[in-house]
Image: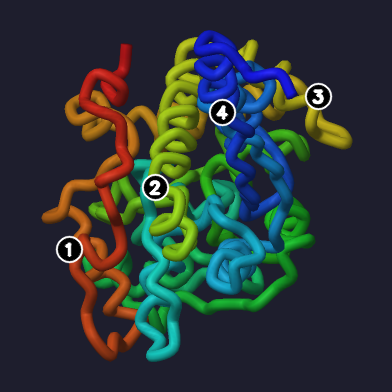
C-alpha cells in the first residue's frame, strides 16, 4: 500500500467534505430572498465549504416548526413569531443568529379614494385581515401609540389570496400586511400609486425587527463554525444585493417559476430602502439587534400576547455568530 507523502496529506486535510445544511425559507422565493439566492448562485456557500439545500415553508410558523423538529437546520422566519413560539413551555430554545430585515415590513395599505388618507382616518373603516397575517399582531400597540380606538376599525377576515384583489375592488378600505408585498402587488394590479396610502408601522413608532435567520440549537452546538460560515455568506450576499439590486434580481428570476423583473426589482428596492438599509444598519452594520430597541419591541408584542415569562434579547438572539464589524458594515 502506498503511503501518502506530507504534501498530499496536507491537501487531504484542506479538502474536507462540505458541511451539509438544510435551510428553509418562510415563503416561495421572491425578491426579498435575494441574499440567499446570491449566496448560492455566486458561490458564497461553496467558498465557506457549505452544501446548502434550500426548501420552502408555508410561513414563519411552519419554518420555525421545521427547525424545532430538526427537519431543517436553519431557516428564515419572522423574529416576532419566534418570540411568541419561545414562550411555550415545551418550546425548543431556537435563537436567531442574523437579522435580515432590521425594520419589520408590517404596514396598513389603504386606498385614498376610499377616504383613508392618514392612519387616524381608519376610524370607521373596514380593515381586511388575512389568515396568519403577522402585521395585525402589532396593530393594537400601533393603534394605542397613535390614539386610534381599536373598536372603531372594523376587522374583516379574508383569505390571503384575495387580500389585494378585495382592496383593488373596493370591497375593503385597507388591508394589513407587508409593505413590499401588498403595496407593490396592488400597483401591479393597476391601482394608481397616488391612490395608495402605505402606513409603515416603523414610521409610526414601531421598534419591531423583521425576518431573521434562526438555527436549531442542536445543530448550533454540534457545528458552530458552520453557522458562522453561513452567516458570513449571507452578510456578504446582502452587501451584494444592496450594491447591485438589478443584478441580484436577475439571479432571483432564475429560481422563480414565474416572475416579472420590473415587479421583483421594485419589491427589492422597497425592501432595501425601508427594511434592510435602515439608519441603525448604516450605523451598526448588518445582522445585529439593539437590546434596548428589542426590549421595546417585546413590549409591543405584549399588547396582543400574554407572556408566561417575558424574554430578554439574549433569550431570542445570539450575536456570537455574526462577522466582525468590518464584515457587517455597509460598504
Residue 100 percent across, percent down from the top left: 43, 40
- Asked if the residue under mark 3 is in contact with the one under mark 4, i.e. CB atoms within 8 Å, the reply is no
226 left or right of 130 in image: left
**Which residue is depicted at the point 28% across and 53% down?**
318
For the residue labelled by badge 3, is the local secondary structure a helix, a strand or a loop? loop
Q: Which residue is mark 3?
A: 254
Q: Which residue is mark 2?
A: 224
Q: Which residue is mark 4?
A: 49
Mark with earlier residue (2, 3): 2
Mark with earlier residue (4, 3): 4
Mark with earlier residue (3, 1): 3
**Which residue is depicted at the point 39% across and 47% down?**
224
Disc 3 residue crowd, few under 14, some 14–19, many 20+, Cα 10 Å: few
Q: Quadrant of the C terminus?
A: top left
Q: Quadrant of the N terminus?
A: top right
Between 137 and 12, the one nearer to me in the picture:
12
For the residue labelled by badge 1, is the local secondary structure a helix, a strand or a loop? helix
Q: Which mark is nearer the camera, 2 or 1?
A: 2
Alpha-carbon distance for marks 4 and 3? 23 Å
Q: Which residue is mark 1?
A: 295
Image vertical order of residue 44 relative to residue 243, above or below: below
Alpha-carbon distance for marks 4 and 1? 36 Å
Q: Which mark is nearer the camera, 4 or 1?
A: 4
26 left or right of 219 in image: right
Mark with earlier residue (2, 4): 4
Alpha-carbon distance for marks 2 and 4? 14 Å
Disc 4 residue crowd, few under 14, some 14–19, many 20+, Cα 10 Å: some
Question: Furthest residue to the right?
Answer: 257
- Asked if the residue under mark 4 is in contact with the one under mark 2, i.e. CB atoms within 8 Å, the reply is no
Disc 1 residue crowd, few under 14, some 14–19, many 20+, Cα 10 Å: some
Amino acid at each position: 500500500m502506498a503511503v501518502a507523502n506530507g504534501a498530499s496529506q496536507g491537501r487531504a486535510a484542506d479538502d474536507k467534505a462540505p458541511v451539509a445544511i438544510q435551510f428553509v425559507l418562510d415563503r416561495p422565493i421572491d425578491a426579498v430572498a435575494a441574499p440567499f439566492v446570491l449566496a448560492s448562485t455566486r458561490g458564497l456557500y461553496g467558498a465557506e465549504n457549505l452544501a446548502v439545500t434550500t426548501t420552502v415553508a408555508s410561513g414563519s410558523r411552519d419554518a420555525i416548526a421545521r427547525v424545532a423538529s430538526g427537519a431543517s437546520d436553519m431557516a428564515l422566519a419572522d423574529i416576532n413569531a419566534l418570540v411568541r413560539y419561545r414562550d411555550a413551555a415545551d418550546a425548543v430554545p431556537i435563537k436567531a443568529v442574523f437579522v435580515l430585515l432590521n425594520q419589520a415590513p408590517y404596514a396598513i395599505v389603504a386606498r385614498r379614494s376610499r377616504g383613508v388618507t392618514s392612519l387616524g382616518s381608519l376610524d370607521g373603516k373596514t380593515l381586511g385581515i388575512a389568515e396568519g397575517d403577522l402585521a395585525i399582531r402589532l396593530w393594537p400597540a400601533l393603534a394605542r401609540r397613535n390614539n386610534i380606538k381599536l373598536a372603531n376599525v372594523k376587522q374583516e377576515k379574508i383569505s390571503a389570496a384575495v387580500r389585494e384583489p378585495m382592496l383593488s375592488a373596493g370591497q375593503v378600505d385597507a388591508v394589513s400586511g407587508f409593505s413590499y408585498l401588498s403595496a407593490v402587488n396592488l400597483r401591479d394590479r393597476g391601482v394608481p400609486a397616488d391612490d395608495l396610502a402605505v402606513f409603515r408601522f416603523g414610521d409610526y413608532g414601531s421598534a419591531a425587527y423583521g425576518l431573521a435567520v434562526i438555527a436549531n440549537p442542536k445543530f448550533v452546538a454540534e457545528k458552530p463554525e458552520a453557522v458562522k460560515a453561513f452567516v458570513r455568506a449571507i452578510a456578504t450576499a446582502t452587501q451584494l444585493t444592496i450594491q447591485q439590486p438589478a443584478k441580484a434580481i436577475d439571479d432571483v428570476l432564475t429560481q422563480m417559476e414565474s416572475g416579472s423583473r420590473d415587479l421583483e426589482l421594485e419589491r427589492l428596492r422597497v425592501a432595501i430602502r425601508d427594511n434592510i438599509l435602515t439608519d441603525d444598519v448604516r450605523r451598526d452594520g448588518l445582522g445585529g439587534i439593539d437590546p434596548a430597541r428589542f426590549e421595546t419591541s417585546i413590549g409591543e408584542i405584549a399588547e396582543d400576547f400574554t407572556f408566561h415569562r417575558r424574554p430578554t434579547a439574549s433569550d431570542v438572539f445570539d450575536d456570537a455568530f455574526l462577522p466582525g464589524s468590518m464584515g457587517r458594515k455597509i460598504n
